[in-house]
Image (spheres, helix red, strand yellow):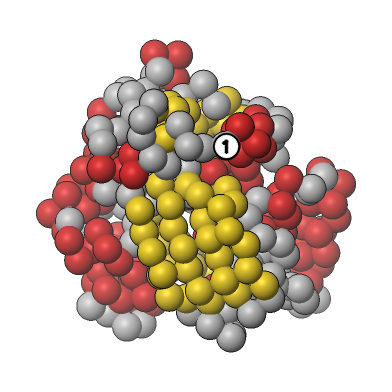
Amino acid sequence: MTLIVTGTIGIDTIHAPTGSVENVLGGSCTYFAAAASFHGPVRIVAAAGDDLPDSMRATLASFKGLDTSGLEVRRNSKTFRWGGRYHTNMDRRDTLFTELGVLVEPPPPVPPAFADSQFVFLANSHPAVQLGFLERLPSRVLTVADTMDLWINTARPELDRLLKQIDGLVLNYDEAELLTGKRNPVTAARHMLDMGPSFVVIKKGEHGCLLVHKEGIGALPAYPAENVIDPTGAGDSFAGGMMGYIASQRARGTAPKNAPADDPLNIGVEILLPALAHGTVMASFTIEEFSLAGLSRLTRDKLDQRFTEYVNMLRIW
């Protein structure tokens, strides 16, 4: 079952206590797709300007199973650019500049060959763009979206419509409170379930993540990373690891035997908690280096070894 993602391809400038980099590959679509590709094929739909260096396109193409034929490079347009500065504790950051570039232009089309995609992730972008993307994917069976404070504040009507059409929502703790007005994350997530999704994943950074599903609740800690260089893209890598795992399991026909007829995928707590564990481990590699360097150098053996370490860490008897 094929996984597809839409979102941003970006060029980032990052200042952190650990150092600074300028003009490096970034973007929500980029991090998600790179992470998800370790579990199986991933299709991307995104736009960039002709200022996107060939080296960055080569980095994307280097991830096995990542189909970049949906990347539209527009002549005489500018790639989305973002600059940020992290605080000493790496928990908070200040945006130094945002240059929207192609994001103010019409969104890229979905290639006809991608229309049969079944697993859909809507990486962070305007809810109206996310809604339009869904209309071009009639074969979707699982749709999960990310959002952010900007859209909660400026595009709430479109976001509310989107929530009614998706199966899962991924967002961070502050965004959950902003969206619902509820400070307790469990209460906030339950409120979001009433808005449409079947499950909500709340990212809490170094404190792990929380899953609230109509079937129940789960929580996982973060991987205890010793070398945090750059948190940029950690959330998107987390989502990529999560969705990549789900799509890979369903592609192997591992749906639970008791899956109900009206929900043959049965994406419940039973599969979501392992998926969150895979996302957590994937994000731990992203934060160890700037940009996509951590994922570019990642091997399957290293990924499996760390996942085993993480699972053993969770065992209490």
Q: Nearer the viewer, residue 32 or 250?
A: 32
Viewer can see residue 180: yes
Q: Left or right of 74: which side holds 15?
A: right
- Locate residue 185 relative to residue 315 in the image: left or right: left
Location of the N terminus (image quadrant)? top right
Residue reaching furthest left? 157
Which corner quadrant of the image does residue 134 belong to? top left
| Residue 82: x %, y % from top left | 44, 58
Residue at horizontal 44%, vertical 28%?
73
Residue type at mark 1? Answer: Pro
Mark 1 crowd level (few <14, some 14–19, many ≥20, 10 Å Cα): few
Rendered position, 205 above or below 77: below
Residue drawn 25% across the image and 43% down it: 104
Q: Position of residue 120 (x, y in %)?
A: 43, 36
Relative depth, front residue between 52 and 253: 52
Q: Residue 121: x, y in percent?
A: 44, 41
Instruction: Tell me the residue at 83%/64% (across/down).
Output: 309
| Residue assigned mark 1 | 53
**Quarter of the view holding residue 59:** top right
Q: Nearer the viewer, residue 203 or 236?
A: 236
Q: Residue at x 34, y 44 (%)?
A: 101
Residue with the most extreme top position: 112
Q: Is residue 272 visible?
A: no
* x and y percentages locating residue 256 in the rendered image: 58, 40
Q: Quadrant of the C terminus?
A: bottom right
